[in-house]
Amino acid sequence: MTVEKKAILQKFPRSPDVLLSLLHALQRTNPQNYLTQEDLKLAAEYLGLPLSRVRDAVSFYTMFSLKPRGRHIIRVCESPNCHLAGAWSVVEELKKTLGIEVGQTTPDGLFTLELTSCLGACGVAPVMMVDDEVFGNLTPERVREILRGIRGAG
Amino acid sequence: MKRLFLLLCSGSACQSSGALAVKQALVEAITEQGLTEEVQIVETGCMGPCELGPILLVYPDGVYYVRLKPADVREIVTEHFLKGRPVRRLLWTAPAPEPRTIPFFARQMKIVLGNCGQIDPEKIEEYIAVGGYEALARVLTEMTPEEVIAEITRSGLRGRGGAGFPTGKKWQAVREARGNPKYVICNADEGDPGAFMDRAILEGDPHSVLEGMAIAAYAVGAEKGYIYVRAEYPLAVKRLEVAIAQARKMGLLGPRIFETDFSFDIELRMGAGAFVCGEETALIASIEGKRGEPRPRPPYPATFGLFGKPTLINNVETFANVRHIILRGADWFANIGTETSKGTKVFALAGQVKNTGLVEVPMGITLRELIFGVGGGVPEGRRFKAVQIGGPSGGCLPESLLDVPIDYESLKKYGAIMGSGGVIVLDDTSCMVNVAKFFLEFTADESCGKCVPCRVGLRLMLSILERIARGEGTEEDLQQLEDIGHMIQSTALCGLGQTAPNPVLSTLRYFREEYLAHIQEKACPAGVCPALIHYEIQGELCRACDLCRRACPTGAVQGTPRNPPYSIIQDRCIRCGACLEACPFGAVVKIPGRKG
Ligand SMILES: Cc1cc2nc3c(=O)[nH]c(=O)nc-3n(C[C@H](O)[C@H](O)[C@H](O)COP(=O)(O)O)c2cc1C
Ligand code: FES
């Protein structure tokens, strides 16, 4: 176990109800934004849960991934308000600029493109999140600008 | 002495349109002009009209600046703050020292949202300055738990999470339930697409939720609370963390609050992207670290909830109402609204309506007042067609029902629901078959798959709708949709399945002729379903500029430059509409029905 992961575990009490928070934290420390088999074992052992139960939980929630993803996760809202406001042109622009389909990761490992249901920012539809940040009133130009910004920041 | 107060909205929506950069620019310009002593910037929660963001409200002048850019800021500072001349081109409306004179606000009644946009949500002192935690103090020092429950019951407050269960009655059940410890849970999972009132409250006035939970805990006899918040709401998570830490520091959470025997603390739990976790039994399973699947009720969480203990679970907006009822009294609250639905409700107005955003109105106002009074009606030149109310499981109501009062019972009677308060206005460019299909796709995707009626039934309905949209439906299909829909309503395990057929059933009820047009005439009257429309080029308008031919991805447009008219080879056309968008002369038209 890496020192980093050990430090994460120790921030949590050994009680099953922290499972999701713990998994979020472990997933975030992996640069590729996913949970390794090792992570699942760590969580299970630390919380005293059967590994099968941890696997079961992970498979249920869409925000956990067992496959490596990009360093940044782009999630475009596909719910009604965003849909009506033209979310598809945003998705098309992202696909074109990044050269990937929804669910894929760019070859340089920087971005994964995903869809999500409503992000609760419908007042500024169409909306996407990049990691923890919300971007609204999107147009294809604005999307290109945002991607450039993130690429620049590394 | 501060002379001007700048309320800068920094809710998620305004942040996403650049509020933080505007703040930066404000700070710089104010410092440059030496106004730091006179001007105070307050970062607030959501003010409501999100699409106008970033928004700055200047007090005491009552001036709203909208759609601000960092480049505008210097002018505002030098002209307005220094010389007292508001910058007109950046104003939303004429200066209105009393925001109530602005039509968007005039018909609203802000109780739950009262603090949102008025105080800095990251400063507990500001909350306390406007009466925060007074209700908790009063409850702990002057009232017995029974009296608190009686007051909430008398107020008529009902759950704002969708089902509208009487809150006092729920508290009573948890109080009476045997078992220890007891828990209080705040449902902040807000998964309904189009709803963002809970987010606005959490981001704009987090302490009102903590205070409501503490009062509830005292009433039911709990010492520990959880807030289950969506992982998609990082700003809400952050503001809650700050609020909880500040409340603990001031002794408003933790052991022996206000030096009484009452102790209460709150922990945050994050979801991980599963809509069904908003359902209370699924949510409890998720807090326990399991798959978030619902289970049959009874037993209800009130007797068998978190870790098998008696548990009170209420929605964010429900908790945010509590302090107002305690402070102003049950009678005051019960005076607002209708016979069965009391108080206000926050709605998220969206779709084809002039003013979008969050609005809070008294229960019982009509749909017409909400959509046309507060919302300003549909945009110029369009016709109102339907309002979809209650989220993806809500119903679509037609123009003839616009005078229905908004309360739990009336909406249900006509096939819609209050739900969480999402309102989408549809005009004549929307196809009701397509709308029904769209919402059903959402619920079918989110079905957790545990019960057969929901898992299989919704898919079946969806395939029928897809068939109709392709022009391959029959009249028997409509009957079948209704039969399956009613079957799912009565047999599904949880509220997701029980309400999911609503969009289909309500559109069948009020817009049947539109379904029939798809079936009998093979035409989509609104011109939306690609299989049931075609495009034509009107020869007399065509200038043979060649733009449409170049835009067409399938080579379906035919013609030679400068030699009108062009034409479309129908069996090559995929009806993507690229030619229509490309044409500068309006010569390309979309026509309902197949070419025939
Ligand atoms: C599929 C489904 C999703 C739900 N999502 C939410 C939600 O996001 N937020 C919420 O407060 N209630 C939601 N509910 C309602 C909860 O089950 C529960 O009734 C509510 O939290 C009780 O609080 P209240 O009495 O204050 O309304 C949902 C119900 C169902 C069936
Ligand atoms: S519909 Fe996209 S953020 Fe709500």
Image (spheres, coloured by chain):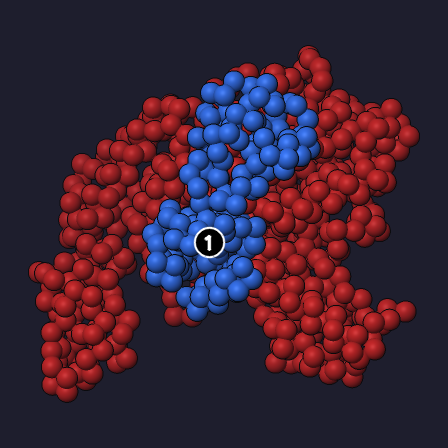
Chain colours: A blue, B red
Q: For the C terminus of chain B, which image quadrant?
A: bottom left
The reply, left or right, for residue A5 in relation to residue B435 is right
Query: Could you tell me residue B252's position as x and y percent?
Result: 83, 37
Residue at image coords 75%, 51%: B122
Query: Could you tell me residue B532's position as x and y percent?
Result: 19, 55
Front-lying residue, B380 or B115:
B115
Query: Which residue lies most toward the top here?
Result: B178
Q: Is residue B534 visible?
A: yes
The reply, left or right, for residue B465 in relation to residue B31 is left
Chain letter behind tag 1: A
Q: Is mark 1 within 8 Å of ligand 2?
A: no
Residue at image coords 67%, 15%: B177
| Mark 1 Cα shell of 10 Å, populated few (<14), some (14-19), many (≥20) | some
Q: Which residue is mark 1?
A: A110
Query: Which residue lies most toward the bottom here?
Result: B562
Query: Could you tell me residue B479's position as x and y percent?
Result: 23, 35
Instruction: Specify the amino acid type for callout 1.
Output: Leu
Is B240 above or below relative to B360? above
Query: Could you tell me residue B50's position as x and y percent?
Result: 57, 60
Number of marks: 1
Q: Is residue B403 visible?
A: no
Residue at image coords 46%, 25%: A56
Front-lying residue, B122 or B146:
B122
The reply, left or right, for residue B410 in relation to residue B523 is right
**Circle 1 — which element?**
loop
Residue at image coords 30%, 28%: B456
The reply, left or right, for residue B587 in relation to residue B64 is left
Q: For the N terminus of chain B, which image quadrant?
A: bottom right
Is B406 above or below relative to B297? below
Front-lying residue, B277 or A40:
A40
